[in-house]
Image: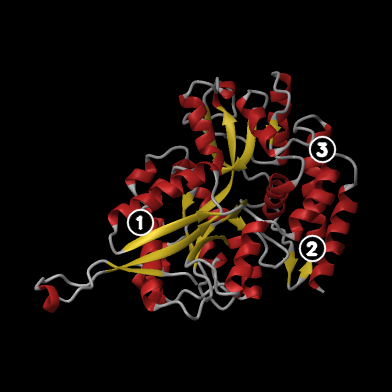
């Protein structure tokens, strides 16, 4: 891997008569996939780190999100030309393990970083570990879907409590009642999300599935036992809402955000990363209403919300020097200690000392929906799951068409089961 050591003062005092100690600056090659508000915040953190450290400097590179990023990581690590540290989705960990691209993080590594396993929420720590408990990445956040809502429109109704939070949504029937009311009030698409397919539809489907206690994968079998019925029910709920005009017809990601911003949707279910979008719009006085965000309501048997995590991972490079690895771990530890700035992007820090701080408690709506960290439902631990995976393809080709009436929920679930199972057999 590429590493550069710059000698700042390597001249012998015996030669020049100067008492100048030798100092080496380690340059850490950093890759991420962070765009938009995430990218702006991460670049600011990197600049702050570099300003504070004379012995370590981060050289940051931002690559394309999704499949292009992970393909480049795989090929670069294979030829020894990867970064020293990189951001990584924990939903991609199973595939990373199969490809052998990550270096395990030991307890001694965490100590070097000034961290311990007890500093992190349980769910992302488990997602960052192998089945035998070996840590393969250091979680940085929990990013999940939340329910954004128009507080102004809900004022004086039974769906808003004294603190301005959503209430009375304890079942699918309750949600249908609220959305039907919103339709009657003139909201053309009462609940918006990315309904054309992709990540938005997967997150909605998987949240409903997990709220039934459903599992996509059980001992290597896709939708085993009654999980097939739970998948059908999840699709049927969304299909019913679509048939009743309560969710938009094949809305793209950008269109779904615009429906809420433009006052066409009462509710909007999307990732926490859109918090800055609505904050900025409110500050610019272009939103036109008071908004807030809560954890996705429990509509079925148990609380659960789709979630993933950005994490820091060290590529598997047997030639990495001890100095570079220590520098990387210093970077990771510093980022955790400064994760309040990252929380400004809407994410819940995985580092619990940040979430337990008074400064985080004052950060809204983040502190209100931080409860979802206990109910985070990560993608199945499989090479066919995670960002830019075959499961996402199944959403585009089967689940979304079923939601929009082009395929029955039963047929969509059965075909998804068969297609995904063939990739595991």
Side (left or right) of 65 relative to 249: left
Position of residue 158 measured from the top left corner of the image (x, y, whole percent): 59, 27
Count of numbered labels shown in the rendering? 3
* Crowdedness near tag 1: few (<14), some (14–19) or many (≥20) residues, C-alpha within 10 Å: some
On the question of residue 350 being in view, the answer is no
> 253 or 269, which is in the foreground?
253
Residues at marks 2 and 3, CA–CA distance in whole angstroms = 22 Å
> 233 or 334, which is in the foreground?
334
Vertically, is 79 above or below 57?
A: below
Position of residue 288 measured from the top left corner of the image (x, y, whole percent): 55, 19
Image quarter where the C terminus lies is bottom right
Q: State the residue position of label 3.
A: 240
Q: Residue at x 67, y 44 (%)?
A: 299
> 39 or 192, which is in the foreground?
39
* Crowdedness near tag 3: few (<14), some (14–19) or many (≥20) residues, C-alpha within 10 Å: some
Side (left or right) of 90 relative to 361: right
The label shown at residue 41 is none
N-terminal label among 2 and 3:
2
On the question of residue 142 being in view, the answer is yes
The label shown at residue 223 is 2
Which is more foreground, mark 1 or mark 3? 1
Residues at marks 2 and 1, CA–CA distance in whole angstroms = 40 Å
Residues at marks 1 and 3, CA–CA distance in whole angstroms = 45 Å
> Quick check: marks 1 and 3 in contact, CB under 8 Å?
no
Q: State the residue position of label 1.
A: 337
Vertically, is 315 above or below 45?
A: below
Question: Under tag 1, what secondary structure?
Answer: helix
N-terminal label among 1 and 3:
3
Q: Residue at x 79, y 49 (%)?
A: 396
Question: Under tag 3, what secondary structure?
Answer: helix
């Amino acid at each position: 891997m590429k590493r550069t050591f710059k000698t700042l003062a390597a001249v012998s005092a015996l030669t020049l008569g100067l008492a100048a100690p030798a100092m080496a600056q380690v340059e850490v090659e950093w890759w991420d996939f962070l765009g938009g508000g995430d990218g702006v915040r991460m670049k600011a953190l990197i600049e702050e780190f570099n300003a504070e450290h004379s012995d370590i400097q981060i050289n940051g590179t931002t690559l394309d999100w999704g499949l292009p990023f992970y393909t480049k990581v795989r090929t670069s690590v294979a030829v020894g030309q990867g970064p020293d540290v990189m951001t990584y989705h924990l939903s991609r960990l199973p595939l990373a393990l199969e490809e052998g691209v990550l270096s395990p993080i030991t307890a001694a590594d965490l100590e070097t970083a000034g961290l311990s396993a007890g500093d992190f929420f349980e769910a992302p720590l488990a997602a960052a570990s192998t089945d035998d408990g070996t840590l393969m990445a250091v979680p940085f956040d929990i990013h999940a879907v939340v329910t954004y809502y128009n507080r102004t429109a809900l004022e004086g109704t039974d769906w808003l409590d004294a603190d301005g939070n959503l209430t009375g949504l304890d079942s699918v029937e309750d949600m249908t009642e609220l959305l039907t009311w919103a339709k009657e009030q003139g909201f053309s698409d009462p609940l918006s999300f990315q309904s054309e397919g992709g990540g938005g539809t997967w997150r909605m489907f998987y949240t409903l599935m997990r709220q039934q206690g459903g599992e996509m994968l059980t001992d290597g079998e896709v939708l085993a036992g009654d999980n097939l019925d739970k998948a059908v029910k999840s699709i049927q709920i969304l299909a019913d809402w679509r048939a009743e005009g309560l969710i938009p017809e094949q809305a793209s990601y950008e269109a779904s955000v615009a429906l809420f911003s433009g006052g066409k949707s009462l509710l909007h279910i999307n990732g926490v990363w859109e918090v800055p979008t609505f904050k900025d719009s409110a500050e610019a006085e272009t939103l036109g209403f008071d908004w807030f965000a809560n954890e996705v309501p429990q509509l079925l048997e148990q609380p659960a919300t789709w979630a993933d995590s950005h994490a820091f991972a060290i590529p598997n490079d047997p030639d990495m020097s001890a100095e570079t690895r220590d520098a990387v771990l210093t970077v990771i530890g510093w980022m955790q200690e400064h994760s309040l700035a990252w929380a400004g992007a809407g994410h819940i820090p995985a580092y619990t000392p940040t979430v337990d701080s008074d400064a985080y408690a004052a950060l809204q709506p983040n502190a209100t929906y931080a409860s979802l960290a206990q109910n985070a439902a990560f993608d199945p631990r499989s090479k066919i799951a995670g960002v830019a995976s075959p499961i996402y393809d199944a959403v585009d080709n089967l689940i979304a068409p079923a939601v929009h009436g082009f395929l029955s929920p039963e047929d969509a679930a059965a075909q998804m089961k068969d297609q995904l199972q063939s990739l595991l057999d």
